[in-house]
Image (cartoon, coloured by chain):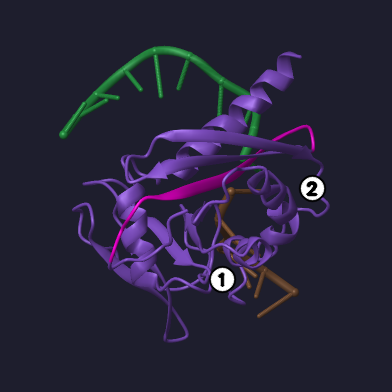
Chain colours: A purple, B brown, C green
Amino acid sequence: MGKLSQAQIKESHVAGVDVSYFDEQGIACAVLLSFPDLRLLGKSFYCGTPGFPYIPGFLALREGILCALAVRKLDPKPDLLFVDGAGSAHPYNYGLATFLEEELDVPTIGITKKPFVGEFTPPPIERGSFSYLYLNGVKIGAVLRTRDGVRELFVSPGKRLSIEEAVRWTLLLSQYRKPEPIRLAHQYSRLACQNRRIA
DNA sequence: GCGACAG
DNA sequence: ATCTTGTCGC
Protein backbone atom coordinates (compact mmCIF):
# COMPACT_ATOMS: atom_id res chain seq x y z
CA MET A 1 0.00 0.00 0.00
CA GLY A 2 1.99 2.95 -1.23
CA LYS A 3 1.64 6.31 0.42
CA LEU A 4 1.16 9.42 -1.60
CA SER A 5 4.00 11.89 -1.76
CA GLN A 6 5.26 14.19 -4.42
CA ALA A 7 8.91 14.17 -3.39
CA GLN A 8 9.01 10.41 -3.71
CA ILE A 9 6.58 9.06 -6.24
CA LYS A 10 6.38 5.37 -5.61
CA GLU A 11 3.93 2.67 -6.50
CA SER A 12 0.41 3.31 -5.48
CA HIS A 13 -3.18 2.67 -6.41
CA VAL A 14 -5.07 5.42 -8.15
CA ALA A 15 -8.81 5.40 -8.75
CA GLY A 16 -11.38 7.34 -10.70
CA VAL A 17 -15.16 7.46 -10.41
CA ASP A 18 -17.99 8.72 -12.60
CA VAL A 19 -21.77 8.34 -12.96
CA SER A 20 -23.91 7.84 -16.07
CA TYR A 21 -27.70 7.92 -16.27
CA PHE A 22 -30.50 6.03 -17.90
CA ASP A 23 -34.16 6.56 -17.02
CA GLU A 24 -33.64 8.33 -13.71
CA GLN A 25 -31.27 5.55 -12.73
CA GLY A 26 -27.62 6.27 -12.07
CA ILE A 27 -24.76 3.84 -12.49
CA ALA A 28 -21.54 4.78 -10.76
CA CYS A 29 -18.34 3.11 -11.89
CA ALA A 30 -15.04 3.22 -10.07
CA VAL A 31 -11.83 1.98 -11.65
CA LEU A 32 -8.56 1.11 -9.96
CA LEU A 33 -5.26 1.66 -11.72
CA SER A 34 -1.70 0.93 -10.70
CA PHE A 35 0.75 3.79 -10.62
CA PRO A 36 2.95 4.67 -12.41
CA ASP A 37 2.30 1.96 -15.00
CA LEU A 38 -1.43 2.74 -15.22
CA ARG A 39 -2.61 -0.84 -15.52
CA LEU A 40 -6.29 -1.50 -14.97
CA LEU A 41 -6.45 -3.53 -11.76
CA GLY A 42 -10.20 -3.61 -11.38
CA LYS A 43 -13.52 -1.87 -11.62
CA SER A 44 -16.70 -1.76 -9.56
CA PHE A 45 -20.24 -0.52 -10.05
CA TYR A 46 -23.12 0.70 -7.96
CA CYS A 47 -26.59 1.33 -9.39
CA GLY A 48 -29.27 3.41 -7.73
CA THR A 49 -31.64 6.33 -7.95
CA PRO A 50 -30.09 9.66 -7.02
CA GLY A 51 -31.82 11.00 -3.94
CA PHE A 52 -31.52 14.56 -5.12
CA PRO A 53 -32.04 16.48 -8.41
CA TYR A 54 -29.23 18.14 -10.28
CA ILE A 55 -28.82 21.63 -8.95
CA PRO A 56 -25.57 23.47 -9.71
CA GLY A 57 -23.68 23.70 -6.45
CA PHE A 58 -25.23 20.56 -4.98
CA LEU A 59 -23.83 17.83 -7.18
CA ALA A 60 -22.40 16.11 -4.10
CA LEU A 61 -25.91 15.56 -2.79
CA ARG A 62 -26.94 13.93 -6.05
CA GLU A 63 -23.93 11.77 -6.90
CA GLY A 64 -21.94 11.65 -3.69
CA ILE A 65 -23.36 8.49 -2.19
CA LEU A 66 -23.48 6.59 -5.48
CA CYS A 67 -19.81 7.40 -6.08
CA ALA A 68 -18.80 6.55 -2.53
CA LEU A 69 -20.51 3.17 -2.65
CA ALA A 70 -18.81 2.27 -5.93
CA VAL A 71 -15.38 3.32 -4.68
CA ARG A 72 -15.81 1.35 -1.45
CA LYS A 73 -16.11 -1.80 -3.52
CA LEU A 74 -12.55 -1.38 -4.78
CA ASP A 75 -9.84 -3.48 -3.23
CA PRO A 76 -7.40 -2.34 -2.21
CA LYS A 77 -8.54 1.09 -1.16
CA PRO A 78 -6.96 3.68 -3.49
CA ASP A 79 -4.31 6.16 -2.40
CA LEU A 80 -5.71 8.88 -4.64
CA LEU A 81 -9.12 9.41 -6.24
CA PHE A 82 -10.00 11.41 -9.33
CA VAL A 83 -13.52 12.77 -9.40
CA ASP A 84 -15.69 14.11 -12.21
CA GLY A 85 -16.66 17.30 -10.43
CA ALA A 86 -15.13 20.19 -8.55
CA GLY A 87 -13.10 20.16 -5.38
CA SER A 88 -12.11 23.58 -4.08
CA ALA A 89 -13.30 25.31 -7.26
CA HIS A 90 -16.77 25.57 -5.78
CA PRO A 91 -18.72 28.59 -4.47
CA TYR A 92 -18.70 27.14 -0.95
CA ASN A 93 -15.55 25.08 -1.36
CA TYR A 94 -17.63 21.94 -1.22
CA GLY A 95 -17.76 20.24 -4.55
CA LEU A 96 -18.25 16.53 -5.23
CA ALA A 97 -14.52 15.88 -4.86
CA THR A 98 -14.44 17.68 -1.53
CA PHE A 99 -17.37 15.62 -0.30
CA LEU A 100 -15.83 12.32 -1.39
CA GLU A 101 -12.50 13.10 0.24
CA GLU A 102 -14.22 13.48 3.57
CA GLU A 103 -16.62 10.60 3.03
CA LEU A 104 -13.95 8.13 1.95
CA ASP A 105 -10.96 9.55 3.79
CA VAL A 106 -8.91 9.53 0.58
CA PRO A 107 -7.17 12.48 -1.08
CA THR A 108 -9.17 13.56 -4.13
CA ILE A 109 -8.66 15.66 -7.23
CA GLY A 110 -11.68 17.21 -8.88
CA ILE A 111 -11.74 17.56 -12.65
CA THR A 112 -14.29 19.51 -14.69
CA LYS A 113 -14.54 20.47 -18.32
CA LYS A 114 -16.07 23.85 -17.61
CA PRO A 115 -15.37 26.28 -14.78
CA PHE A 116 -18.16 26.36 -12.24
CA VAL A 117 -17.04 29.61 -10.65
CA GLY A 118 -14.02 31.90 -10.81
CA GLU A 119 -12.01 33.87 -13.32
CA PHE A 120 -8.87 32.95 -15.23
CA THR A 121 -6.69 33.68 -18.21
CA PRO A 122 -6.26 30.78 -20.65
CA PRO A 123 -2.89 28.99 -20.32
CA PRO A 124 -0.51 28.53 -23.30
CA ILE A 125 -1.35 25.76 -25.76
CA GLU A 126 1.43 23.40 -24.69
CA ARG A 127 0.70 20.35 -22.56
CA GLY A 128 1.61 21.02 -18.95
CA SER A 129 1.04 24.76 -18.97
CA PHE A 130 -1.54 26.09 -16.57
CA SER A 131 -2.92 29.20 -14.96
CA TYR A 132 -4.86 29.72 -11.78
CA LEU A 133 -8.57 30.01 -11.22
CA TYR A 134 -9.52 32.80 -8.81
CA LEU A 135 -12.65 33.58 -6.86
CA ASN A 136 -12.74 36.87 -4.98
CA GLY A 137 -8.98 37.09 -5.20
CA VAL A 138 -8.47 33.60 -3.81
CA LYS A 139 -6.85 30.75 -5.75
CA ILE A 140 -9.41 27.98 -5.91
CA GLY A 141 -8.01 25.79 -8.66
CA ALA A 142 -5.98 25.50 -11.83
CA VAL A 143 -6.74 25.69 -15.53
CA LEU A 144 -4.58 22.97 -17.04
CA ARG A 145 -3.64 21.99 -20.57
CA THR A 146 -3.22 18.22 -20.54
CA ARG A 147 -2.49 17.95 -24.28
CA ASP A 148 -1.05 20.29 -26.88
CA GLY A 149 -3.69 22.47 -28.45
CA VAL A 150 -6.57 20.77 -26.68
CA ARG A 151 -9.21 22.45 -24.54
CA GLU A 152 -8.10 23.03 -21.00
CA LEU A 153 -9.29 21.16 -17.94
CA PHE A 154 -10.23 22.66 -14.58
CA VAL A 155 -8.42 21.07 -11.68
CA SER A 156 -9.16 21.54 -8.00
CA PRO A 157 -8.25 19.27 -5.08
CA GLY A 158 -10.16 18.26 -1.98
CA LYS A 159 -8.74 19.53 1.29
CA ARG A 160 -5.47 17.63 1.52
CA LEU A 161 -3.58 18.19 -1.72
CA SER A 162 -2.40 21.59 -2.85
CA ILE A 163 -3.45 22.95 -6.21
CA GLU A 164 0.08 22.41 -7.50
CA GLU A 165 0.13 18.79 -6.35
CA ALA A 166 -3.23 18.24 -7.99
CA VAL A 167 -1.90 19.63 -11.26
CA ARG A 168 1.17 17.44 -11.02
CA TRP A 169 -0.81 14.25 -10.44
CA THR A 170 -3.29 15.12 -13.16
CA LEU A 171 -0.49 15.43 -15.69
CA LEU A 172 1.07 12.17 -14.56
CA LEU A 173 -2.21 10.37 -15.12
CA SER A 174 -3.23 12.03 -18.38
CA GLN A 175 -2.55 10.39 -21.70
CA TYR A 176 -5.53 12.00 -23.40
CA ARG A 177 -7.40 15.13 -22.38
CA LYS A 178 -8.80 13.69 -19.19
CA PRO A 179 -6.81 11.64 -16.67
CA GLU A 180 -7.09 7.88 -17.27
CA PRO A 181 -8.98 7.05 -14.08
CA ILE A 182 -11.82 9.39 -15.02
CA ARG A 183 -11.72 8.59 -18.71
CA LEU A 184 -12.11 4.89 -18.00
CA ALA A 185 -14.70 5.28 -15.24
CA HIS A 186 -16.78 7.40 -17.59
CA GLN A 187 -16.37 4.90 -20.39
CA TYR A 188 -17.43 1.92 -18.27
CA SER A 189 -20.32 3.59 -16.49
CA ARG A 190 -21.66 4.70 -19.83
CA LEU A 191 -21.21 1.24 -21.29
CA ALA A 192 -23.15 -0.18 -18.35
CA CYS A 193 -26.06 2.13 -19.17
CA GLN A 194 -25.91 1.08 -22.81
CA ASN A 195 -26.27 -2.57 -21.88
CA ARG A 196 -29.25 -1.84 -19.69
CA ARG A 197 -31.07 -0.20 -22.60
CA ILE A 198 -31.09 -3.31 -24.69
CA ALA A 199 -31.99 -5.46 -21.72
C1' DG B 1 -35.61 41.05 -11.07
C1' DC B 2 -32.19 38.84 -14.74
C1' DG B 3 -28.84 35.71 -16.22
C1' DA B 4 -25.37 32.06 -15.08
C1' DC B 5 -24.92 27.69 -13.45
C1' DA B 6 -19.84 21.17 -12.21
C1' DG B 7 -22.63 16.57 -13.87
C1' DA C 1 -25.92 14.17 -17.82
C1' DT C 2 -28.60 12.84 -22.37
C1' DC C 3 -30.50 12.78 -27.61
C1' DT C 4 -26.38 11.21 -31.85
C1' DT C 5 -22.49 9.59 -37.42
C1' DG C 6 -19.44 10.78 -39.89
C1' DT C 7 -15.61 13.43 -40.49
C1' DC C 8 -11.52 16.54 -40.41
C1' DG C 9 -6.91 16.71 -38.49
C1' DC C 10 -2.52 15.63 -35.72
On residue A50, which mark appears? 2
The subunit letter for the residue under badge 2 reads: A
Q: Where's the C terminus of chain A, which quadrant?
A: top right
Q: Residue at x 74, y 53 (%)?
A: A65
Q: Residue at x 58, y 51 (%)?
A: A77
Residue A175 sits above or below residue A88 on the image: above
Distance from Cα at disc 1 to Cα at disc 2: 21 Å
The answer to which of A122 and A10 lies nearer the viewer is A10
Give the extent of the magenta segment.
A8-24
> What's under tag 2, amino acid-wise?
Pro
Can I make out residue A26 in this image? Answer: no
Q: Residue at x 70, y 63 (%)?
A: A58
The subunit letter for the residue under badge 1 reads: A
On residue A90, which mark appears? 1
- Residue A96 in the image: state x and y as whole percent: 62, 61
Relative placement, left or right, of A6 versus A127 is: right
Mark 2 nearby-residue class (10 Å; few <14, some 14–19, many ≥20): some
Where disc 1 sits, the SS reads loop
Q: Name the residue at the front extreme.
A: A1
Where disc 2 sits, the SS reads loop
Number of numbered discs on residues: 2
Relative placement, left or right, of A134 versus A29 is: left
- Residue A76 in the image: state x and y as whole percent: 57, 46
Relative placement, left or right, of A60 versus A37 is: right
User: Going from the N terminus, do you reach mark 1 or mark 2 first?
Assistant: 2
